[in-house]
Amino acid sequence: MEKLGSMMEYRLKTFTGWMGRSGNGSLEELLNDACDTLVLWPWVTVLWYGGLGLVLSYGLYLFYYQVLVWKRDLTDIGYNHILDAARIGKSDRTRVDTINRARRLRKIGDRLPPPYPNGWFSVLESENLTRGEAKSVDCLGQNLVVFRTEAGEVNVLDAYCPHLGANLGVGGIVRGDCIECPFHHWSFSGQDGQCTNIPYSKSGTVPKVARLRKWRSLEVNGFIFVWHHVDPEVEPWTINVVQEIEDGRWVYYGKNEFLVNCHIQDVPENGADVAHLSAVHGPNMISGSDIRYSRPAWADFGMHSWFASWKAPEEGEPMHIAKMDLVHSFRIFNKFEMGKIDVRAYQIGPGYVQLMMNTSMGPFVVLQTVTPIEPLVQKVIHRFYAPRSMWNAIFQKFAILAESIMFERDMMVWNHKQFIDNPLLIKEDRLIKSYRKWYSQFYSENSMSFTMAKEKLDW
Ligand code: FES
Ligand SMILES: [Fe+2]
């Protein structure tokens, strides 16, 4: 009996000790303490589960609204074979130099088309330019200042101040619908680029020639586009608006963004190059984006299958829009089919693609922009939009991840390929020929040549 009593005392001590109570007294006190504790149990349980519920709900809320951003720089993708051979690690000081040496040694090909075609090009994403903000953007062989007035309107002007050459995108301040230069505070109107005020001019007059070039711009579906055309008389075409995005029925789920080392024409050529689909994008995404390793035997259990066709516009259709139809499915052991996606893609001009996706679980859209940053450096962005749902909160993240891996496989080819002006095509490659013919409409006689564009970059 005595032994039983001491055992109970020990257990109660342990129990009350665990509950954070003192428990130093006699057996009777300990029993009383334990009874008090047991009375508190329901409240402890409620608090515990309540807290856990709150944390989980908050996590779910974050997951539901969280956008996924996948961003890779110019030297991130496609150079590991060089780094591996030289035993250069990710944080090695010589990493970027080694990659740049490889870029310089690359034979880029002969007779490259002009690097900056005519058309609408994305210069910024809307969310990256708040009211009253000015940014400098370098692309298409131009240095631009892009700013948003307090009223929300976007203006794009040449960046260099005609006074003494300061860059208005670096420290320029938005005042009303004007931008003020950081160097001597001259102001330029966003409407037409005209200088409107020189604060220290005693006469108060402003030379008429103090004017910046104003670029036509357009803000639609989350992008700010600029009209780039060497022929100033050519009227811009209108960009098709995805109404579901514009009116908020479909929401933004995230994006990927890459800098690719190739000619702009190579990127959209992918759509007409139907033979590369099973070669590069057949092996399943688990095998990764490094094309040296993306075809292991074990990955054969599941392959992506693609059926694609590319069509130039027909008579009566807008000449700047080409169409592509694509059916994707995932085949397990080449028998069971799942993940079917029907894609209708509209290639709108040289640097913009709208991919309208249809799945059994609903539609979604991917918007792709390609903007030349340098003659052989393209900024490519894919933004994903779909109706708000828990399914899409999961599926869209997966889709962004899958598309990023697939795109990086293309990048590994693009970053090292030559541009071949007169490629050796077989009958089955005929769409590439049609594509090149269609794309050539975006070059004019006066387009800046590739060599000239390269020379302009050298100081
Ligand atoms: S350089 Fe712009 S105001 Fe002087
Ligand atoms: Fe591809």
Image: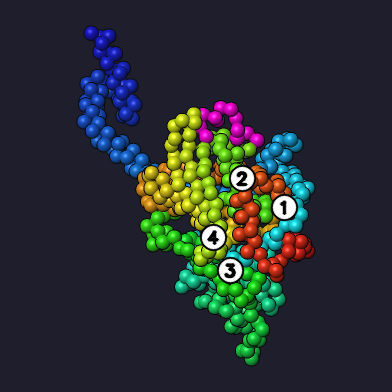
Q: CA distance from mark 1 to mark 2?
A: 16 Å
The crowd level at tag 3 (other Cα within 10 Å; few <14, some 14-19, many 20+) is some
Magenta region, residue range: 292-303
Asked where in the image residue 381 lies, by quadrant, the reply is bottom right
* Residue found at x 60% / y 48%: 273
**Quarter holding the C terminus?**
bottom right
Q: Pointer 1: what residue?
A: 422
Q: Pointer 2: what residue?
A: 428
Q: CA distance from mark 2 to mark 3?
A: 35 Å
Q: CA distance from mark 1 to mark 4?
A: 23 Å
Amino acid found under the numbered disc labelled 3: Trp
Asked if the residue at tag 2 contacts the one at tag 1, i.e. Cβ–Cβ closer than 8 Å, the answer is no
Q: Pointer 4: what residue?
A: 313
Amino acid found under the numbered disc labelled 2: Glu
The crowd level at tag 2 (other Cα within 10 Å; few <14, some 14-19, many 20+) is few
Q: CA distance from mark 4 to mark 2?
A: 20 Å
